[in-house]
Image (cartoon, grey):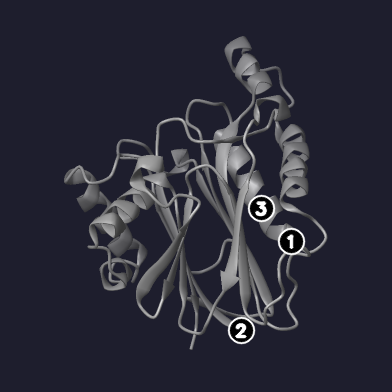
Amino acid sequence: MKLVWKAFSLCKEGNREEENEDAVYPHLVNGSSLIADQFSCAMADGATTSSFSKLWANLLVKESSLSRAASVDFYQAINAARASWKAALPDKELPWPTAIKVRQGAFATLLWFHIWQKNGVYPLNTLPPDHGWTANAVGDTCLFQVVKGKFVSTFPFTQAKDFSNTPDLISTNIAYTRSRAGSISGKWQRGDHFLIATDALSEWMIRKLESGTLTWALVSENLTSLVRFQTWIRYLRRQSLIKNDDTSLICLTVDV
């Protein structure tokens, strides 16, 4: 199986890039070609209102991607991220407002994606087609599948009205994680594209799907470089078509 990887991000207007709380894993060069029997990746969106949410988002994507869904399930990966979170916190005493927030927990969305071919590793609770994929998600980071140039599925949201200012979030404090992960699986064929996007761009894409005006050509022409992607997102923001928020996208193509 040959995969082509692209990943782009742009911080919220008015912020510095180091303040971007979206996270992607693995960290690969755009345009990289991968030959593998299976591949995992993930995207998370840290909640701005919590402390150390950028750190939490990065731990979530790393632990879930490395699990490969073989012997470690989605929830075990989240618990592994919680353990890493505790170990990564600063040793020095924190100011009391920050310490209170840390005890309350950091929060983030998470979408984990795994794809495999025959002889690849796949989740035990998933049917093992020769060419399969599966995803788990908590929150409003979304997955899109493009088949023969057409958007055929979205997950976990399918309607723009599903988006809100209070999405489900995974917390470092298990007591504050109320939601269960959604899951989906399917088959792929050569030439398929899988897009993963944080909420600002996902909501716009689903609105365009609802109006029948979202095409693969419209999206793909803006994925030729980081500069092109960021120019596109800035344009959408200026036109008030998407909200001003950290905006990230992964494009994984099953090469022909």
Residue located at (70% from left, 28% from top) = 173
Residue 6 location (% of width, % of height)? 46, 68
Residue 109 location (% of width, % of height)? 55, 42
Q: Are marks 3 and 1 in contact (CB under 8 Å)?
A: no
Tell me the tag on residue 69.
1
Disc 1 element = loop
Residue located at (46% from left, 30% from top) = 166
Residue located at (48% from left, 35% from top) = 167
Q: Residue furthest bottom?
A: 256
User: In the rendered view, would you say 167 is above or below 74?
Assistant: above
Q: Is residue 42 left or right of residue 120?
A: left
Disc 3 element = helix
Task: Give the amino acid at mark 2.
Answer: Met
Task: Give the amino acid at mark 3.
Answer: Lys
Q: Earlier in the sequence, mark 3 or mark 1?
A: 3
Asked whether the viewer can see residue 145, the reply is yes
Residue located at (18% from left, 45% from top) = 238
Q: Is residue 18 left or right of residue 109?
A: left
Q: Are marks 2 and 1 in contact (CB under 8 Å)?
A: no
Nearer the observer: mark 2 or 3; the answer is 2
**Residue receiving disc 2:** 1
Count of numbered labels shown in the rendering: 3
User: In the rendered view, would you say 104 is above or below 141?
Assistant: above
Tell me the tag on residue 62.
3
Other-residue count near label 1 (Cα within 10 Å), few / some / many at <14 / 14–19 / ≥20: many
